[in-house]
Amino acid sequence: MEIWPGPMEGVMSAPFVRAVNRLGLVERWMTPFLRLTTACPRGKHLKTFLEPFAAGGVPVTVQLMGVDPDVIGEAAARFRDLGAAEINLNFGCPSRQVTGGGAGGGALRHPDALLRMVERVKTFLPDLPLSVKLRTGWSSPEEALSLLPALARTGALDRIFLHFRTVSEGYAPTDGRETRLAAAVAALETIPCIVNGDIRSAAEAHELTAATGASGVMAARGWLRDPWLLRRIAGETELPDVETGRQCLFAEVLSDGFRCCRAIELSQFLWGRDNPWFDRLRRLPPGATVGPELFR
């Protein structure tokens, strides 16, 4: 079973990625999306974006998002030359700031254009794996049952990452995860499908793949709440408990110095409402650097 950390915009800062690499929490990376507009960024910018992930010595899939297939293709080819193991196209982000311009999950409203983009980007990457990350549809999970076979017929993709919600559902509590994903995986037939959405334990991950026939799982928010989750899914034992794991990761991120406002955000992602560090951190200036002294 393939086990993937989910890309998280606003979480995967360079200090966070370096800390995860030092702790050995992942066997592969998928970067948060790099949004491309009218031109491909300079090589220095692309190298800086990739560097923290690549420093871990594990394969890195770079996620790109935009509406111009030639700009995306050019950036993809440059990332290939910088050592990326795979390119992923984001067709799933539900943010209105993104979808309003037709990018991310907004692409699902125009499936024909989405298919053309996949085919065009692949021409830039004849020898590099290409994948997509998407949701089951814009407004109905039934949309996936026609789009996924069409994606398979392009012959351009090596795997598909599928979140069970639609774009319109955002992150709202939604029933029917197993049913939706099982139908989608069955519609794909030949391409490996990595499923995600609300995976919070190793048992749940294995139950989900068994129920859907998926080739693997991706965990994002659940992984943050249990930083050793991916290794638990892999069957490892003798790992830190959930609370110890959170404290360990938080301390490791702060070990290089971290801005207070970012530390508050990260602690909220790790603990949510039960954040044990919030009161102490909010008394500090937002721009202050927080380091190991917080734990003394």
Image: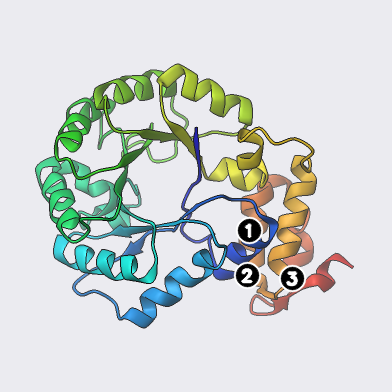
Question: Looking at the picture, which amino acid does disc 1 mark?
Answer: Val
Q: CA distance from mark 1 to mark 3?
A: 12 Å
* Residue 68 shows in the view: no
- Residue toward you, 126 or 22: 126
- Residue ID at (26%, 52%): 99
Q: Which mark is residue 65?
A: none
Crowding at dot 1, Cα within 10 Å, few <14 / some 14-19 / many 20+, comes out as: many
Q: Quadrant of the C terminus?
A: bottom right
- Residue ID at (29%, 77%): 41
For the residues labelled 1 and 2, say whether their Cβ atoms are less than 8 Å apart: no
Give the side of residue 235 with respect to residue 279, left or right: left
For the residues labelled 2 and 3, say whether their Cβ atoms are less than 8 Å apart: no
Crowding at dot 2, Cα within 10 Å, few <14 / some 14-19 / many 20+, comes out as: some
Please give the count of numbered marks on the rendered protein: 3
- Residue ID at (39%, 41%): 170
Task: Please name the residue that numbered disc 1 is placed on.
Answer: 20
Q: CA distance from mark 2 to mark 3?
A: 16 Å
Task: Please name the residue that numbered disc 2 is placed on.
Answer: 261
Task: Please name the residue that numbered disc 3 is placed on.
Answer: 255
- Residue toward you, 112 or 268: 112
- Residue ID at (43%, 58%): 32
* Camera-nearest label, 1 or 2: 1
